[in-house]
């Protein structure tokens, strides 16, 4: 998941991105893309940029400044596009334009379509928008929508409501059906891997909760109690592990969760992280993580098993000055 002082101009030079332009690479090399908040000593303003750098932290480059206030970055699974704030663009910042979306933005696994929700006073609606024509299409409406996710085929959407229902619907709005009905559980953090749907469940006004698993046809429900509060950051390219950000001992850390053995393993050990967002590289060999602390955020690169952790990016001598956040991988 966020706070962003005046320091010397020398530190600005040390930790800000360079001003060079970004030229697409014909052989599409992997880069780390991220957002950064930087305090401008001259203007006394907080500036926000979309940036990139290589895996070793070199060639740190500003791509564009954005003016949407507190913005997120949503990277397409194929590494070719990104949504920053209210703009959608190629990963290198070209062909950008404003894009009207709602909440809970989700890229389809094939990177062709966006799903999102729009809240009304009486209910929440699910829409999809193909990236090619950008014409919103209504999918479904329900009260108290809690979460949504794509199925791996990019043709179906699953979503949960706060009255304990888990539903599936075709992306064209047809064949809406109930997969799971509970009387007292709130279902969140939906993720589909193969024919399994993983989710976090909890009782209203009660914690802790647990991890739930159900097949895509609604059968085979498994509930694992006393599982820490989590969000799913990513799925390993081989579909064998979920990359979780989980809350234990008052702080967030990254965990790998085996989708077959149902065992989790902690891979980061931050002592005071308030949230951690992370993503696998496209070859599955690396993980880039953005850890949010009380006054700043930092990026950490590691091997897929959590070893060889290296901090990247902003200068650390004055952590309140600059924050790198919301990292992802892109091919350029």
Image: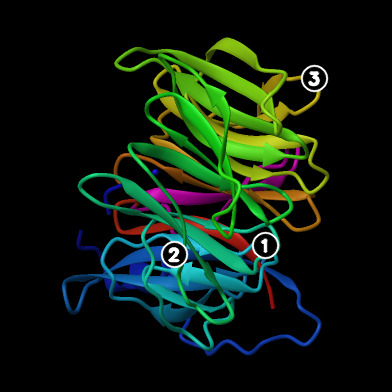
Question: What label does residue 35 carry, if any?
Answer: 2
Image vertical order of residue 49 relative to residue 177, above or below: below
Q: For numbered disc 3, what is the local secondary structure?
A: loop
First reached walking from the N terminus: tag 1 or tag 2:
2
Front position in the image: 38 or 66 = 66
Image vertical order of residue 260 relative to residue 171, above or below: above
Q: For numbered disc 1, what is the local secondary structure?
A: loop
- Measured as percent of width and height from the top left, residue 115 is found at 51, 58
Q: Residue tagged by mark 3?
A: 261
| Residue at x-position 79% and y-position 41% | 239
User: Which quadrant of the figure has residue 65?
Assistant: bottom left
Task: State the extent of the magenta-drawn residues as a range.
Answer: 296-318
Q: Nearer the viewer, mark 1 or mark 2?
A: 2
First reached walking from the N terminus: tag 2 or tag 3:
2
Q: In which quarter of the image is the N terminus?
A: top left
- Measured as percent of width and height from the top left, residue 141 is found at 39, 48
Question: What label does residue 56 carry, if any?
Answer: 1
Question: How far apart are labels 1 and 2 at the CA level?
Answer: 17 Å
User: Which quadrant of the figure has residue 232?
Assistant: top right
Q: Is residue 125 left or right of residue 93?
A: left
| Residue at x-position 49% and y-position 78% | 134
- Measured as percent of width and height from the top left, residue 183 is found at 43, 14
Q: In which quarter of the image is the C terminus?
A: bottom right
| Residue at x-position 59% and y-position 57% | 171
Indicate whether residue 20 is drawn in magenta.
no
| Residue at x-position 70% and y-position 63% | 110
């Amino acid at each position: 998941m966020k706070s962003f002082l005046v320091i010397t101009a020398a530190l600005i030079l040390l930790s800000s991105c360079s001003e060079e332009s970004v030229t697409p690479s014909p052989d599409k090399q992997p880069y780390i893309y991220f957002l950064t908040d930087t305090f401008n000593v001259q203007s006394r303003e907080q500036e926000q940029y979309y940036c990139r750098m290589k895996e070793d932290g070199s060639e740190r480059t500003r791509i564009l400044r954005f003016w949407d206030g507190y913005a997120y970055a949503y990277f397409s699974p194929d590494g070719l596009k990104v949504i920053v704030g209210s703009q959608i663009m190629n990963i290198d910042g070209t062909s950008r334009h404003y894009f009207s979306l709602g909440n809970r933005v989700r890229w389809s696994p094939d990177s062709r379509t966006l799903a999102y929700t729009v809240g009304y006073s009486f209910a929440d609606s699910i829409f999809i928008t193909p990236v090619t024509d950008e014409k919103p299409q209504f999918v479904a409406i329900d009260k108290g929508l809690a979460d949504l996710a794509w199925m791996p085929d990019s043709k179906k959407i699953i979503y949960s409501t706060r009255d304990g229902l888990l539903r599936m619907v075709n992306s064209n709005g047809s064949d809406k059906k109930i997969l799971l009905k509970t009387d007292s559980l709130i279902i969140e953090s939906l993720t589909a891997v193969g024919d399994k749907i993983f989710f976090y469940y909890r009782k209203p006004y009660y914690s802790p909760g647990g991890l739930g698993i159900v097949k895509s046809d609604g059968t085979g429900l498994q509930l694992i109690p006393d599982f820490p509060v989590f969000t799913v950051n990513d799925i390993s390219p081989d579909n064998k592990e979920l990359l979780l950000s989980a809350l234990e001992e008052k702080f967030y850390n990254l965990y790998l969760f085996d989708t077959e053995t149902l065992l989790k393993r902690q891979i980061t050990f931050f002592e005071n992280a308030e949230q951690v967002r992370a993503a696998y590289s496209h070859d599955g060999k690396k993980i880039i993580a953005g850890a949010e602390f009380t006054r700043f955020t930092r990026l950490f690169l590691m091997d897929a098993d959590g070893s060889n952790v290296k901090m990247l990016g902003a200068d650390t001598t004055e952590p309140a000055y600059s924050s790198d956040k919301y990292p992802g991988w892109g091919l350029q």
